[in-house]
C-alpha cells in the first residue's frame, strides 16, 4: 500500500533543538502528576496508554503497510494473561506483564505466519476474524471468567499506573525509533510497504520481516493490556477485546499521520484529550460524540497526511499559512 | 528555523498552561451550598444507552419529585437535590474516570450508580478509594456483592436470587407439572447469570435440563432455538435483555416452537417487549421484583406503587419497569439515611462514613417494597428486602402468578400452540 504522504526516506540526524524539545517534553511528562488533580492524572494516563497502542498499531499498519483490524485482541490477551497470572497462579503483577507481552507476541507469530502471506483487504479481514475469535474464546472459557468478566485486586495508586504506562509507551516509541527509523530492519519494512515484489526481488525475506514486525507490534499492546487490567480492576471480553479498541488505534494513527514516529502520539493526544475535554464540558449529553466524529472525518478526508503532515509543513510561518493549507488540504 | 522552533515551543507551553488552568478549576475548595449535589454515573452513550436511559428516568423521577416537595427535610429544613450526570460511555474505564470526576471535581455528596454491572465493578473501587457512598439502582451481577465493597449498595436483588421465582412457580404451582426445560442465554454477564440461575433453580426443583446453550450477543439465535426445539422441553427459558427477548420470541414463532411455557426475565417487563411483540407477548412468563401493579404502601415520597406508576406515566409517557423503580428507590434510600443522621449539605467525610452506617441500618417500606441492605454473606450491601414475583402476560399486561401467596391471578398453563392463539 503506497503511502504518498508518509515518510519514505531514512531519517538524518535530528537537530539539537529537537532533542531539547524532547527532553523538555519528557521532563514535563515526568513532573505532570505533581500539579495535576486525580481526574487529570487519570486522563493523562489514558492518553499515554492510547499513544502506546496507536504506535503499536503503526508498526504494522503504518511502517509495514498491513492494516490490522484485530490488534485490540493483543491488548485483550495481555489483560487476561495478567489477570490469570495474578488471580489463578498468584504470581506477581510484574511477571504477569512480561508473560502478557510474550503471549501477545507469540500469538502474533502464530497468526501472522499464515495471514501475512495475504495482502490488502484479505489481511485486514483475517485479523478482524482473529480478533472476534479471541473475544468469543474469552467469553466461553472459565479461566477468563467467561461472560462474567474478571475482577482483579484493587491497587488504587494513580501515579504508579501513570508512570508505568509512561515507561511502556516510552519504550514503544524508543523501539520504533531505534528499530524502524534507524536500522536496516526499518528500511526493509519501508521497502515492503512501498513495493513488496521489488523488495522480494532484491532478497528481502518479506514474510519473516513482516512476522517480526507483527510480533513487535503485538508485544506492547499485550503489556499495556496487562497494566490496564490492574488499573481498571475489571475486565470483560467487550471492554478489552471489543472491536472499538482497534478502531481507536487506527483512527488515532491515521489522524496523527501513519508511518511516522510522532503521528500516532499526536493522534492519541488529540483524540483522547478532545474526547475527554468535550466529555467533561458536555458529559450530560452525547452531542460531543458527534463533534468528535465530524472532526475525525474532516481530518481524514481533507488532510490525509494527518496532523504530523501539517506540523511538518511551513504552515506556522507568517505569510505562508494559506499557501500551505492549500497545498496540504485535499479539497 | 529558530523562529519556527520558538513558535512550536509557544504552542507547547500554551497547552501546558491550559492543563494547569483546568487543574486549578478542579482543585477549587469545597463550596458552601444548601442543596445536595448528587453524582450519577450511567450509560448515556454506547451500546448500553437503552439501559442508561432507563436508570436516568428513575433517578430523575426521584430528584424531580423530591424537589417538587421542597426537598429532603432534615431537622426542620428542606434541602433540594441537584443531579450531576457523567456518561460512562458503556465502558468500565470511563465509569472509573466518571467517578473520579464527580468525586474530585464536582465534589458530589454521594453517587447513584450505573445501569450495568461492568461499569459498576469499575466504579466501585473508585468510590471505595474516596470513601464515597454509592448506590446502584440497576446493576444485578452477584460479582458486585461478593467483593464486599464497603461504600457500594444496590436496590435490586442480584439476578441469581430473583430468577428463581418463576421456575419455582412453574415447578410447583401449575398442572400438569412440567418435567423438562431447555435454557438459552446470551453471553453478557446479566443474561448468563440469569441462564445459570434458571438452570440451578430447575435442578434444585427436579426439572430435567435437556439443553443449556449460551450464545454470543447479536448473533442469529435461530440455530440455538432450533436445537432446543428438537429436544422438545416443557419449558423454554431465556436469559437476555429486551432486544434479544423480542428476537427470540419471534424466532420461536417462526419455527412454530410450542413449549408449554416461555420464560423470560428482565426483557419481558419492559414496555418495548409488549410493543415489539404485540399479541405474541401473551402467555409469556417472567420474573421481577417489582411491577406497577403491586400494592406497596409507604409514607416516603410516593404513598403507593400506583401513585409512583401514575406519576411516572404522566412524566415520561411510558410505564415504569423495575429498573426505573429500583433507581428511584436508590434515591429514596439515600434521603432516608440522610434524615437518620441529620446530615446537611455539603457532606463532610465523617458524614459520608456515617451515611454508610445509616444505610446498613436502613429498613424502610417504599412504593418499591422493602429496602433493607444485607450486611453479610455473598449479597453484602444488596437489597435483601424484596421477594421475586413470577409474572405472566395475560390480556396484554403482566399479572402476578406466584410463587405461593404472591399469586393474584392463576397462571395460564400450558401455553396454547401458535396456530391456536
Image (cartoon, coloured by chain):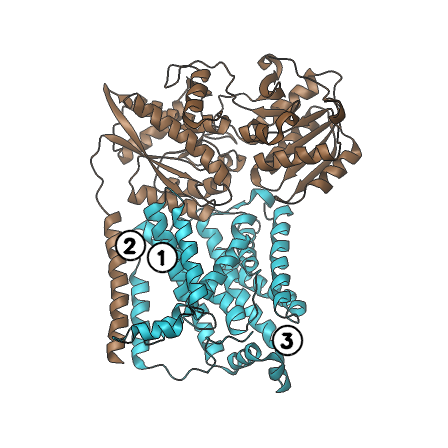
Q: Secondary structure at mark 3?
A: helix
Position of residue B228 relative to residue A294, above or below, is above
Q: Are marks 1 and 2 in contact (CB under 8 Å)?
A: yes
Counting other residues with Cα less than 10 Å from the Cα at mark 1, is it few (<14), some (14-19), or many (20 or more)?
Answer: many
Left or right, residue A263 beside residue A87: left
Q: Position of residue A112 (x, y in %)?
A: 63, 68
What's the CA distance linking mark 2 and mark 3? 46 Å
Q: Secondary structure at mark 2?
A: loop
Q: Is residue B204 visible?
A: yes
Position of residue B223 relative to residue A211, above or below, is above
The dot on residue A44 is 1
Q: Residue at x 53, y 51 (%)?
A: A83
Q: Nearer the viewer, residue A85 or A42?
A: A42
Q: Residue at x 34, y 52 (%)?
A: A277
Which residue corresponds to mark 3? A207
Position of residue B400 relative to residue B67, above or below, is above
Amino acid at each position: 500500500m503506497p503511502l504518498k504522504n508518509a515518510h519514505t526516506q531514512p531519517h538524518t540526524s535530528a537537530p539539537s533543538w529537537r532533542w531539547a524539545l524532547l527532553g523538555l517534553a519528557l521532563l514535563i511528562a515526568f513532573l505532570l502528576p505533581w500539579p495535576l488533580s486525580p481526574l487529570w492524572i487519570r486522563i493523562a494516563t489514558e492518553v499515554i496508554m492510547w499513544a502506546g497502542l496507536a504506535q503499536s498499531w503503526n508498526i504494522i499498519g503504518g511502517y509495514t503497510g498491513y492494516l490490522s483490524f484485530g490488534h485490540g485482541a493483543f491488548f485483550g490477551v495481555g489483560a487476561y494473561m495478567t489477570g490469570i497470572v495474578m488471580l489463578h497462579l498468584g504470581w506477581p503483577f510484574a511477571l504477569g506483564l512480561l508473560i502478557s507481552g510474550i503471549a501477545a507476541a507469540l500469538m502474533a507469530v502464530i497468526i501472522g505466519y499464515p495471514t501475512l502471506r495475504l495482502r490488502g483487504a484479505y489481511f485486514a479481514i483475517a485479523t478482524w476474524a482473529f480478533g472476534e475469535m479471541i473475544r468469543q474464546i474469552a467469553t466461553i472459557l472459565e479461566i477468563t471468567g467467561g461472560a462474567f468478566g474478571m475482577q482483579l485486586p484493587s491497587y488504587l495508586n494513580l501515579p504508579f499506573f501513570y508512570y508505568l504506562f509512561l515507561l511502556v509507551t516510552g519504550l514503544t516509541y524508543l523501539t520504533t525509533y531505534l528499530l524502524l527509523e534507524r536500522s536496516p530492519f526499518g528500511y526493509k519494512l519501508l521497502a515492503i510497504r512501498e513495493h513488496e515484489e521489488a523488495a522480494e526481488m532484491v532478497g528481502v525475506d518479506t514474510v519473516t520481516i513482516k512476522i517480526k514486525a507483527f510480533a513487535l507490534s503485538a508485544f506492547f499492546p499485550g503489556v499495556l493490556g496487562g497494566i490496564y487490567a490492574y488499573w481498571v480492576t475489571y475486565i470483560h471480553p467487550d471492554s478489552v477485546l471489543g472491536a472499538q479498541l482497534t478502531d481507536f488505534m487506527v483512527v488515532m494513527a491515521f489522524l496523527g499521520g501513519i508511518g511516522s514516529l510522532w503521528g500516532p502520539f499526536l493522534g492519541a493526544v488529540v483524540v483522547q484529550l478532545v474526547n475527554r475535554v468535550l466529555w467533561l464540558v458536555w458529559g450530560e449529553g452525547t452531542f460531543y460524540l458527534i463533534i468528535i466524529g465530524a472532526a475525525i472525518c474532516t481530518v481524514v478526508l481533507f488532510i490525509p497526511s494527518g496532523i504530523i503532515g501539517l506540523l511538518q509543513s511551513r504552515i506556522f510561518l507568517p505569510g505562508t499559512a494559506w499557501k500551505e493549507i492549500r497545498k496540504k488540504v485535499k479539497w | 528555523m529558530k523562529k519556527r522552533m520558538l513558535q512550536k515551543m509557544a504552542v507547547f507551553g500554551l497547552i501546558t498552561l491550559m492543563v494547569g488552568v483546568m487543574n486549578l478549576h478542579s482543585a477549587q475548595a469545597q463550596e458552601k451550598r444548601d442543596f445536595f449535589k448528587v453524582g450519577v454515573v450511567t450509560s448515556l452513550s454506547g451500546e448500553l444507552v437503552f439501559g442508561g436511559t432507563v436508570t436516568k428516568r428513575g433517578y430523575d423521577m426521584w430528584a424531580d419529585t423530591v424537589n417538587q416537595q421542597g426537598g429532603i427535610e432534615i431537622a426542620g429544613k428542606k434541602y433540594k437535590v441537584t443531579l450531576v450526570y457523567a456518561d460512562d460511555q458503556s465502558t468500565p474505564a470511563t465509569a472509573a474516570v466518571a467517578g473520579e470526576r464527580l468525586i474530585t471535581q464536582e465534589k458530589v455528596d454521594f453517587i447513584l450508580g450505573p445501569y450495568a454491572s461492568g461499569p459498576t465493578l469499575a466504579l466501585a473501587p473508585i468510590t471505595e478509594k474516596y470513601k464515597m457512598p454509592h448506590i446502584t439502582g440497576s446493576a444485578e451481577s452477584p460479582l458486585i456483592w461478593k467483593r464486599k465493597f464497603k461504600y457500594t449498595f444496590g436496590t435490586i436483588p442480584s439476578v441469581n436470587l430473583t430468577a428463581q421465582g418463576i421456575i419455582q412457580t412453574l415447578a410447583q404451582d401449575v398442572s400438569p407439572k412440567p418435567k423438562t426445560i431447555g435454557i438459552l442465554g446470551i453471553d453478557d454477564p446479566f443474561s448468563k447469570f440469569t441462564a445459570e440461575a434458571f438452570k440451578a433453580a430447575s435442578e434444585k426443583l427436579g426439572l430435567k435440563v435437556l439443553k443449556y446453550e449460551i450464545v454470543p450477543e447479536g448473533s442469529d439465535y435461530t440455530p440455538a432455538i432450533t436445537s432446543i426445539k428438537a429436544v422438545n422441553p416443557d419449558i423454554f427459558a431465556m436469559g437476555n435483555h429486551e432486544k434479544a427477548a423480542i428476537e427470540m420470541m419471534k424466532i420461536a414463532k417462526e419455527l412454530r416452537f410450542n413449549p408449554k411455557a416461555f420464560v423470560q426475565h428482565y426483557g419481558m417487563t419492559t414496555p418495548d417487549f409488549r410493543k415489539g411483540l404485540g399479541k405474541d407477548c401473551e402467555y409469556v412468563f417472567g420474573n421481577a421484583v417489582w411491577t406497577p401493579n403491586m400494592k406497596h404502601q409507604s409514607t416516603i415520597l410516593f404513598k403507593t406503587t400506583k401513585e409512583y406508576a401514575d406519576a411516572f406515566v404522566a412524566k415520561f409517557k411510558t410505564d415504569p419497569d423495575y429498573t426505573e423503580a429500583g433507581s428511584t428507590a436508590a434515591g429514596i434510600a439515600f434521603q432516608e439515611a440522610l434524615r437518620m443522621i441529620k446530615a446537611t449539605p455539603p457532606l463532610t467525610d465523617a458524614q459520608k462514613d456515617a451515611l454508610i452506617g445509616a444505610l446498613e441500618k436502613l429498613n424502610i417500606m417504599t412504593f418499591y417494597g422493602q429496602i433493607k441492605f444485607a450486611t453479610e454473606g455473598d449479597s453484602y450491601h444488596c437489597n435483601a428486602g424484596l421477594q421475586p414475583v413470577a409474572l405472566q402476560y395475560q390480556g396484554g399486561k403482566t399479572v402476578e402468578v406466584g410463587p405461593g401467596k404472591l399469586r393474584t391471578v392463576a397462571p395460564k398453563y400450558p401455553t396454547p400452540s401458535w396456530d391456536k392463539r
